[in-house]
Image (spheres, rainbow, N blue to C red):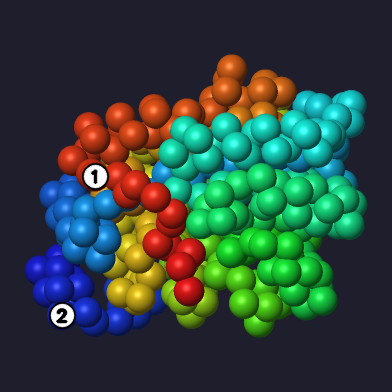
């Protein structure tokens, strides 16, 4: 065990190898070495942001079966959770965005499923942008896009996107992992800052898979990385594999923070929890409306957290919270 060497290397801003990440990921989640990694990760997050965590908030323009069939998603057509299609009106979208802005979100995310019409997304997004404060950070969470569409997203007033190459992309999803990577390059070329995450982590994922994905995200110099566990959707095949604990997730959050360059200010986890914040997570999400980890049509009545609840979790973890627009997505 080389925990003292790892801590020193982190404090010296060293770059970790895959073998070193594998060793850190291989510690028992409840051992002293893991807790030391978590403490070092929290120290980094506090230092990089002046102990100002962020709370971003998301709503979805639609709720309908999705043919991408991500097995971990409640929207997946194959999971047969949601069988009917429902879409927000432009007025409902504006109201949702303004609600999240008024409640103090550091960034407002607009999400759609992969089949949502891109032209309609841009049309509604432009109206949402017009009705928000000029300084409000607006983020897209949409399907893979061409460069021309990425430029349209930028021109519509978005500051960035959330986009992740998920664990076992192309195996647990019907999405080509190379297409996913290409989209990230397109977003960045269009001038959009990309936030990402190591997700959705389940008990079946090896340390090798996790380490490789951590190293890939580090090459992106993203707005933030981090880690999120898979939330079981009842009745699905992946639910039979179970879930990792919050402690294991927090270990991965910490290792991810240590592996990211210091130019990456953010380190996320989902769903929000004090243990994640204690391990260096400085970004939580609040959610309203449809949520791909929930079987409730309105996640605020199910698994979703409010901005106020996220504030409390950060406060309980000794984290301050930024007031105003996100620094993670700042150019």
Q: Residues within 10 Å of mark 1 (few under 14, many from 20)?
A: some
Residue at (75, 31) in percent of width and height: 92
Residue at mark 1 to residue at mark 2: CA–CA distance: 25 Å
Tag of residue 12: 2
> Could you tell me residue 121's position as x and y percent?
81, 52
Q: Residues within 10 Å of mark 2 (few under 14, many from 20)?
A: few
**Tag 2's secondary structure?**
loop
> Could you tell me residue 245's position as x and y percent?
39, 37
Residue at (30, 56) in percent of width and height: 254
Whether residue 81 is visible, yes or no, is: yes
Q: Quadrant of the N terminus?
A: bottom left
Residue at (70, 38) in percent of width and height: 94
Tag of residue 320: 1
The residue closer to the viewer here, 325 or 112, is 325
Task: Give the foreground label among 1 and 2.
Answer: 1
Quadrant in which residue 238 is drawn: top right
The answer to whether residue 242 is left or right of residue 176 is left
Residue at (60, 56) in percent of width and height: 139
Quadrant in which residue 65 is drawn: top right
């Amino acid at each position: 065990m080389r925990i003292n060497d790892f801590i020193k290397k982190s404090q010296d801003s060293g770059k970790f190898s895959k073998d070193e990440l594998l060793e850190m990921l291989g510690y028992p989640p409840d051992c002293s070495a893991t807790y030391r990694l978590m403490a070092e990760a929290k120290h980094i997050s506090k230092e990089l942001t002046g102990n100002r965590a962020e709370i971003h908030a998301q709503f979805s323009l639609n709720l309908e079966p999705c043919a991408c069939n991500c097995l971990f998603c409640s929207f997946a057509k194959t999971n047969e959770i949601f069988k009917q299609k429902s879409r927000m009106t432009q007025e409902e979208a504006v109201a949702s965005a303004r609600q999240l802005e008024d409640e103090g979100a550091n960034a407002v995310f607009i999400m759609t499923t992969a089949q949502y019409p891109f032209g309609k997304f841009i049309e509604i997004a432009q109206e949402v942008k017009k009705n928000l404060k000029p300084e409000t950070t607006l983020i897209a969470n949409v399907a893979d896009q061409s460069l021309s569409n990425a430029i349209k997203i930028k021109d519509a007033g978005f500051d960035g996107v959330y986009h992740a190459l998920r664990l076992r992309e192309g195996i647990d999803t019907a999405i080509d992992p190379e297409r996913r990577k290409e989209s990230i390059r397109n977003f960045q070329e269009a001038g959009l800052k990309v936030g990402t995450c190591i997700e959705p982590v389940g008990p079946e994922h090896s340390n090798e898979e996790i380490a490789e994905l951590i190293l890939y995200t580090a090459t992106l110099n993203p707005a933030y990385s981090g880690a999120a566990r898979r939330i079981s959707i009842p009745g699905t095949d992946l639910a039979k594999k179970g879930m990792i604990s919050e402690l294991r997730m927090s270990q991965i959050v910490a290792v991810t923070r240590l592996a990211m360059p210091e130019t990456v200010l953010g380190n996320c986890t989902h769903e929000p929890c004090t243990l994640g914040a204690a391990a260096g997570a400085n970004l939580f999400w609040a959610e309203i409306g449809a949520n791909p980890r929930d079987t409730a049509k309105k996640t605020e009545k199910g698994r979703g957290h409010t901005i106020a609840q996220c504030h409390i979790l950060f406060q309980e973890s000794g984290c301050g919270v930024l007031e105003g627009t996100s620094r993670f997505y700042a150019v």
